[in-house]
Amino acid sequence: MAKKPMPEDEGMPGAPFWMTTYGDMVTLLLTFFILMFAMSSVNEQKFMQAATSLAQALGVLPKNVSIVGEASPAIGTAGIAREQIDMVESMEQIAEMFQEEALQDVATVEVTGPGEVLIRMGDEVLFDPGESGLKPVALRVLAGIAKSVQGKTESIYVEGHTDNVPISTAEFRSNWELSSARALSVVRLLEEAGVPPEQLAAVGHSQYIPIAPNDTPENRAKNRRVELWIIWSSQNNE
């Protein structure tokens, strides 16, 4: 039986011509946004790799807890990554300096949040017992820290801490005076090393914010410390 011929006005089924152009446009847009996302994620990925490597090799401890909280809002993923990578590079310099000075057991660097770093040093690094004058090694270390962070910070809070052993000398009536004097000694050195004075602050906490129980000589040594809370500059995000 012969096939029935198709009517001349009846064509093959298919999409309208405008759909092809529309589909190409959507595909290009999707490719564009995937490319933009990939570009914005590269630096952040590098930062996470650097932070992990630093944590393993140099004792830097990344955390997700912020000491400032909402004070500095994020401005884009790429901007945050640039700031964090810059911060990690400075931290790596400081940690390497601690290793060169054989201080890695008594001096640590810790990421406490986006753009926030804690440098903690035992008093044996900085001072003789019951004194507030800086040791020669402390002069080198603090000058190195100032050089690594100069021009990159918004503020540096220096906090002095003691153990719970009472002190009463002609110079220091209590641990309040001792911890405050030690914090001020560090602030003065940082200023002399080039940190703008308006970025600096000093406070003494005496024995009242311990990080270990004051029940053994080893734990009391941990509590005798100076901490530098460094807030990175948000200008790197702009």
Image: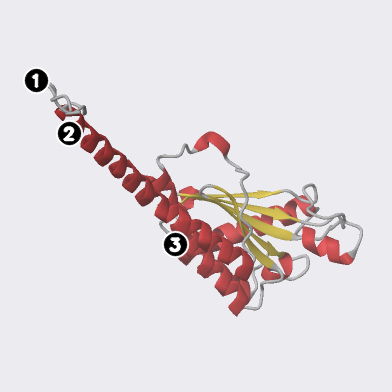
Q: Which residue is mark 2?
A: 21
| Vertical comparison of 195 with 126: above or below | above
Residue at mark 2 to residue at mark 1: CA–CA distance:
25 Å
Residues tagged 3 and 2 counted as in contact (Cβ below 8 A): no
Query: Is residue 192 visible to the viewer in this orientation of the structure?
Result: no
Q: Which residue is mark 3?
A: 194
Q: Residue at x 60, y 43 (%)?
A: 66
Q: What amino acid is labelled 1 in the image?
A: Asp
Residue 36 in percent (x, y) is at 33, 45
Q: Nearer the viewer, residue 23 or 17?
A: 17
Mark 1 secondary-structure assignment: loop
Mark 2 secondary-structure assignment: helix
Quarter of the image containing the N terminus?
top left
Residue 138 in percent (x, y) is at 62, 71
Residue at mark 3 to residue at mark 1: CA–CA distance:
86 Å
Q: What amino acid is labelled 2 in the image?
A: Thr
| Vertical comparison of 161 with 74: above or below | below
| Closer to viewer: mark 3 or mark 1 | 1
Q: Please tell me how crowded label 1 is: few (under 14), some (14-19), or many (20+) other residues with Cα within 10 Å.
A: few
Q: Nearer the viewer, residue 31 or 52?
A: 31
Q: Earlier in the sequence, mark 3 or mark 1?
A: 1
Colour mapping? secondary structure
Query: Is residue 58 visible to the viewer in this orientation of the structure?
Result: yes
Q: Please tell me how crowded label 3 is: few (under 14), some (14-19), or many (20+) other residues with Cα within 10 Å.
A: some
Residue at mark 3 to residue at mark 2: CA–CA distance:
61 Å
Residue 18 as seen in the image, left or right of residue 55: left
Q: Earlier in the sequence, mark 2 or mark 1?
A: 1
Q: Residue at x 76, y 60 (%)?
A: 224
Q: Which residue is mark 1?
A: 9
| Closer to viewer: mark 2 or mark 1 | 1
Q: What amino acid is labelled 3 in the image?
A: Gly
View extreme (right): residue: 215
